[in-house]
Image: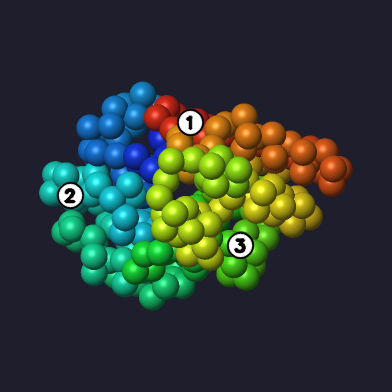
Amino acid sequence: MISAYTLFSSSSGNCTYVTDGDVSILIDAGMNAKHVGLALGALGTSFGSVDAVFITHEHSDHTSALRVLTRKYCPRIHAAEPSALKIPAEHVTAHPVIYTERVGGFTVNSFPCSHDSACCVGYVLRHDSGVKIATATDTGYVTDGMKAALAGCQAVILESNYDERMLETGPYPYDLKMRIMSDRGHLSNTAAAGFLPYLYENGTRRVLLAHISPENNTKQKALGAALESICENGLSGMSVDCADRYEITRLI
């Protein structure tokens, strides 16, 4: 049985845990090692049981636990080469931007996102049992690579970072607002909600909205936009929820 959870998801830290009971995978390891360890403990596991870590990009909210993790436990760390060169940790395997890695019963495929980092990718995890899930965050828009990769995924962790009105009227400086709203920034509630019909048509029935900004968004606004899209487009059978910023949230 496949289980997948976000351990936490926000600009403070991002980490996703996936297991089939035999092997365990982390997507990103942000926040810090203590918080990741406590979250894993709450799920009845530990750092020592992690077989591989796949990094989306080098920003600290996705990598800050890696230094301790690699020094004490030495799991296999995977990242696209431009990001790997900037990650301050040992034992990081550098790959092409689009790559495939086998971990136990999982086949992990990367796909390109569009973010203001050296490189940013999302991941699709296909299990031998037929379960196919994905994480797609930190992208300014839905790229063609995202569309192709996510087709056929039963469950998706999808960025819904900001509410346009909150960002426009909020306290961030103008340059930062423009960066967030750019094609190399983050995905808005509107963009995430607009992507749901495509996902539904291609087999997705469970969506977890993630990387929700505490300054420029609320769970209620992100969920409201998504539910409106589900209602307007007749996406019966699609369930949607929001990943908690600091607590464990189940995807499947």
Classify mark 3: helix, strand or loop: loop
232 or 163: nearer the viewer: 163
Give how far apart the Cα atoms at labels 3 and 2 are. 31 Å
CB contact under 8 Å: marks 3 and 2: no
Query: Quadrant of residue 97 in the image?
Result: bottom left
Quarter of the image for the C terminus: give it: top right
* Position above or below: 148 against 187: below
Q: Which residue is mark 2?
A: 67
Is any atom of residue 227 visible in this view? yes
The image position of residue 156, as x and y in percent, is 59, 48
Amino acid type of the residue tagged 3 in the rendering: Val
- Residue 244 marker: 1
Q: Is any part of residue 162 visible from this angle?
A: no
Residue visible at 34% across and 29% down in the picture: 39
**Above-or-below relation of 105 to 237:** below
Q: Which x, y percent locates residue 224?
A: 69, 34
> Cα distance, mark 1 to mark 3?
22 Å
Q: Amino acid at mark 1?
A: Asp
Q: Residue at x 28, y 32 (%)?
A: 35
Frontmost of labels 2 and 1 is 1
Q: Earlier in the sequence, mark 1 or mark 3?
A: 3
The disc, 3 or 2, on the residue closer to the chain's N-terminal end is 2
Q: Position of residue 247 (x, y in %)?
A: 42, 27
Q: Which of the 4 quarters of the picture holds residue 100?
A: bottom left
